[in-house]
């Protein structure tokens, strides 16, 4: 059964406006009923069991009652609930609980009887080996080859696979945690991580700032630590820790630049955890400890806009959060905009515009593939899993919307508005409707006849891009295209000053009828098949699939076997799936690579490779 009667009551209450301001958006992806009972603080106690690939322990919540309900509604997915207890009359007492039917996207509703006087609830549980929010790597799958590695990926709705929780971004909670691990491993969380290398197997954490559940994060492995500044450090396997610290040395300057524009950094430290290559994303903005793919450790600091993006989330996303996954653009559109402003402040307008132009190209390509309704910023997800509709729309269309507002109102006025926005909604979760009301009051009404609410609604609620949307173009890319045309006629390329962005533009815009001789010539002159920059290699390998350039086939195989970042591997599998011979080859490679892929990477790529029959 998809929805219970209680769920329809939940919808009705949302419609009549009984939610608090931080939970104003209906969240179709959670069973939580924050208007009845919410959980503002979590005490987590977990043992990390690598042999069983399992987290085991309890989650204890403080209860905040908003109604006469005696029930607490939580989200869970593949969790085994061992028992539930409530704190009343100064002692823990057993209580009843029940689990609802399994929903393919939402998992299971967990209902706990909390009586009328309990102030806390404790749920004892353990996770499944197939938990969607956890990846367990054997020693052989790590660089050091001696110790296993485990990490979480909770966004958007995977927290429920490793914690029974009100898994909605409308909730904000603080947490403390105790973790135990096998000897020799270091555990970290999205909290106050110690820089001590003490590995006694017991670790304590505190997150005093209220965060949404998807930002609770955990990892454990054979980690080394390298400080960059007094507030920034890198955690990583030993093989890459020094490289990463050098690569991301500009992070403290990024923090200072963002503070100058948008107000203080409010999370104390900003550390970076460099994960194994199987991490499915470029980065995850877990507060105090961003999780980062090693594929951006390029050796030339050319891909650090990703660090700017995850850092920007400390204002847009972590500080001011989308109240439901329909509102993801409130996180990602603002963050993409702030990221680009950071890059401009540190590295100049030319680089910032190049990155805008590349993002715009990616968005246009994405818009051609998506259904019109999935190109709306305030997207109607229904109960589709948010992972299934991931696209460039909330990121780049959201960024272009803010660029449009900046153009219309002027940078000085718009910056003042954004800084006030981050202050006024700090540590809150808001809906698109709340943002629109705030925008009308604090910007549109104060500067009348500049932008109408009809134009705002076109950006937010209509598919595609408005006719007058910004169309970023880079002079540097025009020069790349001039060189490309000369090279195709037999001339030489002058690439000594090219950045990764210029190389990407060059490869991605080569004519699809480029000759086999020119493919070989390009590879011979610039060793593109063996290049170690993961982004450039991705672009080259994708072109090689299209052009059937066989000298790149071995590198393509090793690339797919050693990298699990979805952005880099999924387009390659998608291209391979277009012909029967390549599809057969891709399936064989995938089956070999699968044990080292994150569950999210497996889901995405199996849909590409096995829906062809």
Image: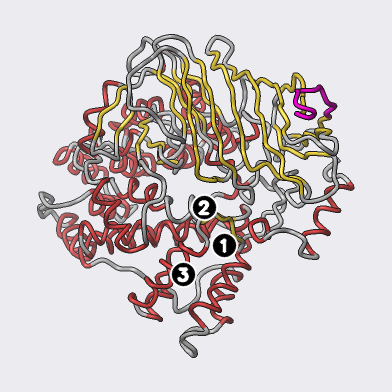
Residues under numbered marks 2 and 1 in contact, where contact means CB atoms less than 8 Å apart: yes
The quarter in which the N terminus is drawn is: top right
Discs 3/1, front: 3
Residue 328, above or below 526? below
Residue 474, above or below 123? below
> Separation of disc 3 and disc 1 at Cα?
13 Å
Q: Is residue 489 left or right of residue 444?
A: left
Q: Magenta includes 532?
A: no
Q: Which mark is residue 391?
A: 2
The reply to whether residue 100 is in sight is: no
Read off the magenta span.
87-97
Image coordinates for residue 203, horizontal then vertical, percent: 46, 21
The quarter in which the C terminus is drawn is: top right
Please give the residue where the numbered disc 1 appears in the rendered image. Answer: 375
Residue 188, above or below 444? above
Q: Which mark is residue 401?
A: 3
Q: Residue at x 49, y 83 (%)?
A: 451
Discs 2/3, front: 3
Residue 578, above or below 449? above
> Separation of disc 2 and disc 3 at Cα?
16 Å
The reply to whether residue 564 is in sight is: yes
User: Outermost residue toward the right?
Assistant: 5
User: Which of pointers 2 and 3 lies earlier in the amino acid sequence?
Assistant: 2
User: Which of pointers 2 and 1 lies earlier in the amino acid sequence?
Assistant: 1
């Amino acid at each position: 059964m998809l929805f219970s009667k209680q769920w329809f009551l939940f919808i009705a209450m949302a419609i009549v406006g009984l939610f608090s301001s931080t939970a104003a958006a209906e969240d179709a992806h959670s069973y939580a009923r924050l208007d009845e009972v919410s959980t503002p603080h979590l005490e987590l106690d977990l043992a990390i069991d690598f042999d069983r690939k399992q987290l085991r322990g309890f989650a204890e919540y403080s209860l905040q009652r908003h109604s006469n309900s005696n029930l607490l509604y939580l989200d869970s997915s593949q969790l085994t609930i061992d028992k539930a207890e409530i704190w009343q009359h100064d002692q823990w007492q057993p209580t009843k609980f029940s689990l609802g039917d399994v929903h393919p996207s939402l998992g299971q509703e967990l209902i706990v009887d909390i009586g009328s006087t309990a102030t806390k609830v404790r749920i004892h549980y353990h996770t499944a080996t197939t938990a969607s929010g956890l990846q367990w790597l054997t020693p052989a799958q790590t660089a050091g080859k001696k110790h296993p590695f485990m990490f979480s990926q909770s966004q958007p709705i995977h927290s429920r696979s490793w914690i029974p929780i009100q898994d909605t971004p409308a909730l904000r909670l603080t947490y403390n945690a105790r973790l135990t691990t096998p000897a020799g491993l270091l555990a970290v969380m999205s909290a106050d991580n110690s820089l001590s290398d003490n590995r006694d197997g017991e670790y304590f954490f505190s997150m005093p700032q209220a965060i949404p559940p998807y930002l609770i994060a955990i990892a454990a492995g054979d980690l080394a630590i390298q400080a960059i500044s007094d507030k920034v450090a890198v955690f990583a396997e030993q093989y890459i820790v020094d490289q990463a610290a050098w690569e991301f040395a500009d992070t403290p300057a990024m923090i200072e630049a963002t503070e100058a524009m948008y107000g203080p950094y409010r999370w104390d430290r900003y550390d970076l955890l460099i994960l194994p290559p199987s991490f499915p994303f470029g980065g995850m903005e877990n507060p105090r400890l961003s999780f980062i793919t090693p594929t951006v450790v390029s050796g030339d600091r050319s891909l650090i806009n990703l660090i700017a993006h995850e850092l920007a989330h400390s204002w847009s996303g972590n500080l001011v959060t989308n109240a439901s996954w329909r509102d993801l653009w409130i996180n990602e559109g603002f963050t993409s905009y702030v990221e680009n402003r950071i890059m401009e402040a540190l590295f100049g307008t030319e680089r910032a515009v190049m990155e805008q132009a590349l993002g715009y190209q990616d968005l246009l390509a994405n818009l051609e593939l998506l259904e019109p309704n999935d190109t709306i910023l305030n997207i109607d997800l229904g109960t589709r899993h948010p992972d299934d509709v991931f696209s460039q729309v909330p990121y780049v269309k959201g960024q272009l919307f803010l660029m449009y507002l900046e153009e219309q109102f002027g940078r000085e006025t718009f910056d003042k508005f954004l800084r006030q926005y981050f202050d006024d909604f700090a540590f809150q979760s808001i809906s698109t409707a709340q943002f629109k009301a705030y925008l009308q009051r604090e910007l549109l009404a104060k500067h009348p006849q500049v932008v109408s609410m009809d134009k705002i609604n076109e950006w937010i609620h209509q598919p595609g891009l408005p006719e007058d949307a910004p169309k970023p173009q880079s002079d540097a890319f025009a020069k790349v295209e001039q060189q490309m045309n000369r090279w195709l006629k037999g001339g030489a390329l002058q690439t000594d000053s090219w950045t990764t962005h210029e190389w990407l533009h060059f490869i991605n815009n080569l004519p699809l009828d480029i000759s086999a001789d020119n493919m070989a010539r390009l590879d011979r002159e610039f060793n593109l098949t063996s290049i170690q920059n993961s982004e450039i290699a991705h672009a080259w390998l994708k072109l090689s699939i299209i052009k059937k350039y066989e000298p790149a086939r071995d590198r393509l195989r090793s690339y797919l076997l050693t990298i699990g970042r979805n952005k880099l591997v999924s387009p390659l599998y998608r291209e391979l799936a277009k012909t029967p011979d390549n599809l057969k080859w891709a399936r064989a490679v995938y089956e070999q690579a699968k044990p080292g892929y994150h569950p999210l990477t497996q889901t995405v790529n199996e849909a590409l490779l096995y829906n062809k029959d």
